[in-house]
Amino acid sequence: MEESKIHKEAVKELAELSEVAPAIEGVSTGTKLDELFFKVEKGKKKPLGGVPKGGVLNIVGVPESGKSVLVEQVAIHQASLGSKVLFLTTESPANFLYTALKGKAEAMGIDFSEIEGKIVVVDASIDELLREDLPSLLATLNYAIKSRGTNVCVVDSITGLYEHKEIMARSIVRRVYNLLKREMQTTFLVSQKRSSQGMETSEAAGGLAVAHIVDGTIVLEKRVITNKFEENIYRMSVGEVLRLLRIDGCRLCGHDPRPWVVKITDEGLIEMIEPLVEFIRKNKGG
């Protein structure tokens, strides 16, 4: 049996960490999410103006709930602010991603030619070795981060790294998370749900492995109105779609936990409308 080794470097007093502890700052998404994260100073809430810097957030939802729409929108917004964005795609090939991001930029009124050099793509969608060999993927991501100087990262989707080996989800997510945290990448991980998982929960493929490891989770829901009871509550007709967004948790700072009504515009953008409770109250009064 291998002799136990004491890792003395892992034992520190809090005072020793003061020089390396990151400040709580916001990274703008260009959506009302920027108003929902906050810190407390002198007993008062202070909005961060974005998601917590250096945080790794999990974006969870059923198909067509708006996950990719949201992260693509954030990538374009951050690039327009001058950030260098790393986009790891395991779903859509890079050439199709280019077209999607270009369309998104046009819908947002942003000159794509001015930002396309700000987004660095790692295409693991058709490169099976890159997608299946985690050490190679991590080395490639590390190279991209350091050589291109990125500070925001999108992974669409993290599920693509363990879609046929969910038993390994926790190990895979942990190693990706550790790299992104070490390199201080503000990250959005897209997670796909299985059909048996409740659309309102943070659970996704791989179980709760992702939610337990990451710094926070944003859940997107897509509810189709199917009966009179729902019609009466939401003042919507059978067949209409109610979309919701909720911050399920965040260990880095405070957040608004209420579900928000959102819509995907005709231009293909996520727009946050108002908290669900206000939406229902207003409709009841109508």
Image (cartoon, rainbow, N blue to C red):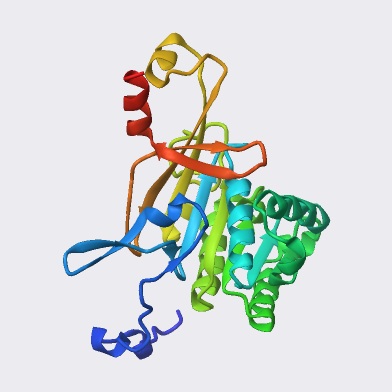
Q: Residue extending furthest top?
A: 228
Examine the image and state in which quarter residue 86 appears: bottom right
Examine the image and state in which quarter residue 129 appears: bottom right
Say left or right for 61 vs 215. right
Q: Which residue appears at 33% of the width and 32% of the height? A: 278
Q: Which residue appears at 43% of the width and 57% of the height? A: 34
Percent position of residue 12, x then y: 29, 86
Q: Which residue appears at 34% of the width and 41% of the height? A: 258
- Report the label total: 0
Percent position of residue 80, x then y: 63, 66
Say left or right for 139 vs 169. right
Say left or right for 98 vs 48. right
Quadrant where the image shows the C terminus: top left
Q: Which residue appears at 58% of the width and 57% of the height? A: 74
Quadrant where the image shows the N terminus: bottom left
- In the displayed structure, would residue 9 be above or below residue 81? below
Q: Residue extending furthest left?
A: 43
Percent position of residue 76, x then y: 64, 60
Percent position of residue 216, x then y: 42, 56
Q: Nearer the viewer, residue 149 or 138?
A: 149
- In the displayed structure, would residue 26 be above or below residue 73? below
Q: Nearer the viewer, residue 93 or 140?
A: 93
Residue 208 in sight in this render: no
Residue 234 in sight in this render: yes
